[in-house]
Image (spheres, rainbow, N blue to C red):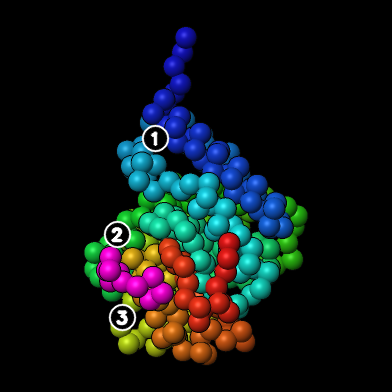
Amino acid sequence: MRSHPNDSMIPVIDHLQQMAEWFNSSARDSGLDVALDPRSCLPQLRNPGMFHAADMMQAYEHCRVTEEQVGVAVRAIARIISQPRRSGLIDSKQDEGSAGTAIMLMFACPVGFLISGIRHAPLYLTANEHRRLGEARGKIRGFLRLYGDIGIIPSYPAARPDAQGHTQDDGGLDLVTYLYGFLEADRYPSGQDFLTEIASAVTARRMPGGLAPNLEAFRQRANGNGYEQIVILDHTLCASGRSSGAAPSRPGPVLHAFAEIDASILDETTPGVVVGISSGTAAPSMQGPVWKL
């Protein structure tokens, strides 16, 4: 019996197909008119001479998402698209697993573009620690390695502006192609491999006292390139600085981050959205913008 041409990739192939099923099931339930189609990226995984096999296996081991993370993220994406420019905090009980949900929110960019024609530029904001930033960039790079080439296909031809360099012949696109289009528009300096460049371009640390000005600068830069911002406040803003003896009602750093954001950035008339990921119960004062997903 002939062996599979690349047996080591069988778990990866199975997972990508499973992840697409999770996404598509949640998308149907949420009324999103798109679907993930991994078939275009499977032939290279079956190639016994696949160049990035070791990197793909490492991404599979450390960066793969769960069904729960995909479901929460898809429901959040549906909310972002159906209620544009409405920011909010996802009240998640996933603890550390919320990192996968946060990175999955980057799919809101190509999905929103296919459905509405709006281009979002993502910014993944971590705690103010170099270690956290490095971890986030590594996770995003692995995430893009694993899922970035999956095709995103509209259920019907969307009425959207022409997007030369973004779309594929079938009317779809993938996450890496979309993000690299933003990277080129932003003139990010070259010199590293493109996944590393993308991960660097879409991440930043939260600088105390400077969150609102930094987000405003990012918004203006994105707007100048024809994009609206989507800022993702990652789970480390909840996890960092939390002591075991803290009172349950004490809001975490992500809530402080929301409070620190200038009102004009969260205003519904301002292009863009800010989404936080909380791994604990939100404070009562946050009931307005909290998303129970």
Which comes before the other along the chain, label 3 or label 1? 1
Instruction: Tell me what residue is drawn at x 64 percent, y 51 percent.
Output: 26
Amino acid type of the residue tagged 1 in the rendering: Met
Q: Nearer the viewer, residue 162 or 253?
A: 253
Distance (Cα) linking label 2 and label 3: 17 Å
Amino acid type of the residue tagged 2 in the rendering: Glu
Mark 2 element type: helix
Residue 91, position as x, y percentages in the image = 51, 66
Q: Which mark is residue 207?
A: 3
Q: Which residues are magenta?
A: 241-250
Residue at which label 2 appears: 135
Residue 168, position as x, y percentages in the image = 61, 53
Left or right: 39 in relation to 204? right
Residue at which label 1 appears: 50
Mark 1 element type: loop
Count neighbours of disc 3 (C-alpha within 10 A) and say few if under 14, some if 14 to 19, many if 20 or more.
some
Amino acid type of the residue tagged 3 in the rendering: Met
